């Protein structure tokens, strides 16, 4: 085990997409309202999405940078080629040495959420944000590869089951 930072196991993805330019394409739209309504993306035609979004790669974890006192960490279970999210989410992609399951579990942990809230800028409770570069430099414990692999092999089926149950409940 070693002391590191978030950037040791996840990189911030910055891929801007204009869904409106692909009006007939069906997008998986990961938005804050969709998160709050059950963590299921909304399927919308590009013509219905009015602003630029960030593309969501297959193994990404979404971390809301808006109002971190309301923890919003989203693990997309099967992001397709037309997955996009609100620019209020940071899109974090695990490095080759990490897994999305490890990143997700770290991001939902109370100590991480407490450190995240310390990065807030803005004076109003309804418009506080976290700066992306601040997230990348937050301290984190980085496990050795074999420990991370063992952790991922145990946690992945559990989180996949959560996603399957969420889909079934919807």
Image: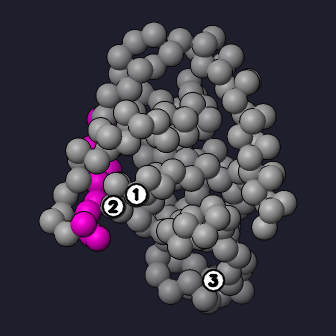
Q: Which of marks 3 and 2 is in front?
A: 2
> Residue 26: x, y in percent?
72, 78
Using a 10 Å C-alpha cutoff, classify the residue at mark 3 as few (fewer than 14 neighbours), some (14 to 19) or many (20 or more). Answer: many
Q: Mark 1 points at which residue?
A: 70
N-terminal of the two: label 3 or label 2? 3
Q: Can residue 119 be seen in this view?
A: yes
Q: Mark 3 points at which residue?
A: 46
Q: How far apart are marks 1 and 3 (CA)?
A: 28 Å
User: Relative to 18, does residue 166 appear above or below in the rendering?
Assistant: above
Using a 10 Å C-alpha cutoff, classify the residue at mark 2 as few (fewer than 14 neighbours), some (14 to 19) or many (20 or more). Answer: many
Please report contact status of discs 2 and 1: CB closer than 8 Å, yes or no: yes
Disc 1 secondary structure class = loop
N-terminal of the two: label 1 or label 3? 3
Residue beneath the point at 18% across and 63% down: 122
Is residue 52 rendered to the left or right of residue 146?
A: left
Q: Which secondary structure dominates the residues rendered in magenta?
A: helix
Q: Quadrant of the N terminus?
A: top left
Along the line of sight, the residue nearer the viewer: 28 or 156: 156
Q: Is residue 28 magenta?
A: no
Q: Distance between the residues labelled 3 and 2?
A: 27 Å
User: Relative to 164, does residue 149 appear above or below in the rendering?
Assistant: above
Residue beneath the point at 74% across and 51% down: 163
* Residue, far left: 123
Disc 2 secondary structure class = loop
Is residue 46 rendered to the left or right of residue 67?
A: right
Using a 10 Å C-alpha cutoff, classify the residue at mark 1 as few (fewer than 14 neighbours), some (14 to 19) or many (20 or more). Answer: few
Q: Quadrant of the C terminus?
A: bottom right
Q: What residue range appears in magenta? A: 125-137
Q: Mark 2 points at which residue?
A: 67
């Amino acid at each position: 085990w070693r002391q590191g930072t978030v950037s040791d196991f996840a990189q911030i993805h910055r891929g801007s997409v204009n869904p409106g330019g692909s009006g007939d394409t069906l997008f998986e739209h990961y938005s804050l309202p969709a998160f709050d309504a059950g963590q299921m993306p909304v399927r919308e035609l590009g013509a219905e999405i009015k602003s630029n979004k960030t593309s969501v790669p297959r193994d990404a974890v979404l971390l809301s940078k808006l109002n971190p006192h309301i923890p919003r960490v989203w693990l997309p279970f099967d992001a397709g080629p037309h997955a996009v999210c609100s620019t209020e989410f940071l899109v974090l992609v695990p490095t080759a040495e990490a897994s999305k399951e490890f990143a997700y579990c770290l991001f939902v942990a109370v100590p991480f959420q407490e450190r995240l809230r310390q990065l807030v800028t803005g004076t109003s409770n309804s418009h506080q944000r976290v700066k992306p570069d601040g997230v990348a430099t937050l301290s984190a414990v980085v496990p050795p590869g074999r420990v991370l692999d063992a952790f991922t092999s145990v946690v992945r089926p559990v989180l996949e089951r959560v996603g399957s149950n969420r889909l079934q409940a919807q």
